[in-house]
Amino acid sequence: MLKRQIGLLTLVAAAALLVGCQTPEPTPEPSPPTDDTRPISTPPPTPEPPTFNDNMEPYYPGSTKLLPRVFYFELDKAVIDQADLAALETHAQVLMDNPRRRVVIEGHCDERGTREYNLALGERRSDAVSRFLKAAGVLTSRIETVSYGEEQPEDPGHTEAAWSRNRRAVMIYR
């Protein structure tokens, strides 16, 4: 048993010797003082993209992409296309964010139909866009509608393609 105790003591002594012989980790030297007394500058703020271009055409908020201002209609219809709803919602937001701006909505038709019918249809088209903007929160006093009927065609042709471009409502900012 004495041999066993001596062996155990030898083992403990060897372990203590090994732990005591480890070299300590070097302490990092302090860095020299800097003479840099310049204030920390923050980068200049990024300018907001413009809301309108020089022709008073609105951009999508926060971008430089122009919002569509022309909305097309089916033959003899004054119903806004589902694909145009998001753009019209953005127009409403642009108008609410810019309370000094007003909008004129022009209604147009193709050349088919009588002058009176086309004036009435153009009015229904401009009114459809106006009602949408009002429902989205734009004040009535900031929206004007006008119908030109067939008098100002976008395309003077006499084909279905030309007529489809002439059946429209156009938003003009002021």
Image (tube, rainbow, N blue to C red):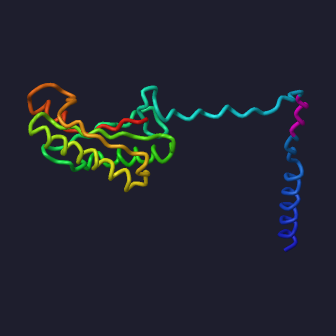
Give me the residue at 51% from left, 33% from top: 50
Residue 19 vs residue 31, the one in the foreground:
31
Tell me which corner region of the image, top left, top right, bottom left or bottom right, holds residue 149.
top left
* Quadrant of the rendering where the C terminus is positioned: top left
Could you tell me how many numbered marks the image carries?
0
Side of 12 where 118 appears, left or right: left
> Residue 8, how many percent across, how many down?
84, 66
Side of 164 where 4 appears, left or right: right
Residue 129 vs residue 93, the one in the foreground:
129
Tell me which corner region of the image, top left, top right, bottom left or bottom right, holds residue 56.
top left
Residue 162 vs residue 146, the one in the foreground:
146
Whether residue 89 is situated above or below residue 64 in the rendered picture: below
Give me the residue at 20% from left, 48% from top: 78
Whether residue 133 is situated above or below residue 49 in the rendered picture: below
Residue 5 vs residue 166, the one in the foreground:
166
Give me the residue at 68% from left, 32% from top: 43
Side of 143 where 16 appears, left or right: right
Write the start and end of the magenta stretch as one range.
Answer: 28-34
Whether residue 83 is situated above or below residue 16 in the rendered picture: above
> Residue 86, how many percent across, how many down?
35, 48
